Amino acid sequence: MVASLAALLAFAVDHHYLEVNPARVQLALRRGPPRRHVTLAPADLIAVWRRQRNHSRLADVTLFLGLTGLRWGELIALRPCDIVQAVRAGPVLTITRSIVRAGGEGTPLVKATKANCDRLVPLSRVALQIADQWADGTDREDLLVTRSDGGPLKPSYFRGQVHWTQTVPAGLRIQDMRHSAATNLLQSGADILGVQGILGHSTRTTTLRFYGHVTGAEHLRAAMDHYEEPLAAGLHPSGGASGATWPPGEAVAFIGEMGNPQQ
């Protein structure tokens, strides 16, 4: 279509109907600043869920997204058979597919996940309880969470049922529940690689680009303090956990030498 349009406009230029072919003009689109994500801390997430619960049981969707970090398409594609008990990880979701719609509201289409890679997402006790309630009385291959008519849940239907704009902070989108889950996990001490696996990012670069700022100076200090513990134990006169046996005063002298660049 673009090639045909460009050829037609080239014909118009050749015959002096136009001075330039707009399809051949290099456009420099001005990019605005990246959108700041609005996230909910755990207490705020519960508060939003309680307000939405006054309107609809679909409020559980908000809480579930905030606990699991799933994409919307992954959530509405879940089936009861996707809830499994892993040997070591406990209850998990197997994320193998996604339901996408043109513009979020078009004809549903089942596809692979965004990164085209299956993954496991651990379920907290609360998330497992929600998933079990959804699965109760349904066939293993049915959709886990649906509209009242059994069809795949639409964002507009969901927002209307829970009175989204009246129950959430200004500017909060459904996608921000995923960002909230990632932020809360990292601030709770989760490893960046673990969060990458939960979110389904293909590389940790993506996770770091979006959430690297969350692991701020306080987390760096905690990491350094944790690293320093065995060193301090090894420098202790009694030997400490590492088994080192420094004579009294020698550890202090060693630390002093570390601060003297000439020794």
Image: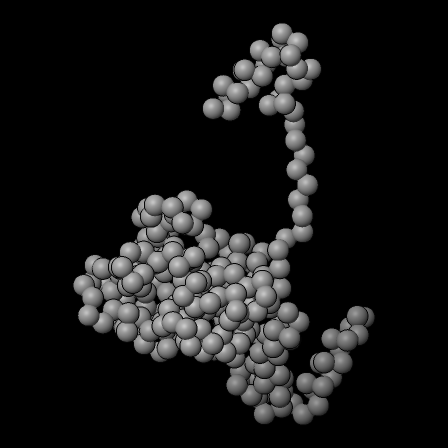
Classify the position of the C terminus by image quarter: bottom right
Q: Is residue 131 left or right of residue 17?
A: left
Total count of labels: 0
Vertical position of residue 146 compared to residue 217: above or below: above
Which residue appears at 40% of the width and 66% of the height?
161
State which quadrant residue 25 falls in: top right
**At x 32% / y 56%, what residue is drawn?**
152
In this rendered view, identify the residue nearer to me: 21 or 85. Answer: 21
Task: Tell which of 236 and 94 is nearer to you.
Answer: 94
- Residue 147 or residue 40, whichever sits in front: 147
* Residue 208, position as x, y percentages in the image: 56, 59
- Compared across the picture, whether 7 is left or right of 92 comes to right
For the point 52% across and 69% down, which residue is it? 166
Q: Quadrant of residue 91?
A: bottom left
In the rendered image, the vertical position of residue 240 relative to residue 212, given as above or below? below
Above or below — where is 197 with respect to 244?
A: above
Q: Position of residue 192 (x, y in %)?
A: 51, 64
- Residue 60 seen in the current view: no
User: Which percent across, then down, holds residue 151?
Assistant: 29, 56
Q: Is residue 213 visible?
A: yes
Residue at the (41%, 73%) spot, across then down: 55
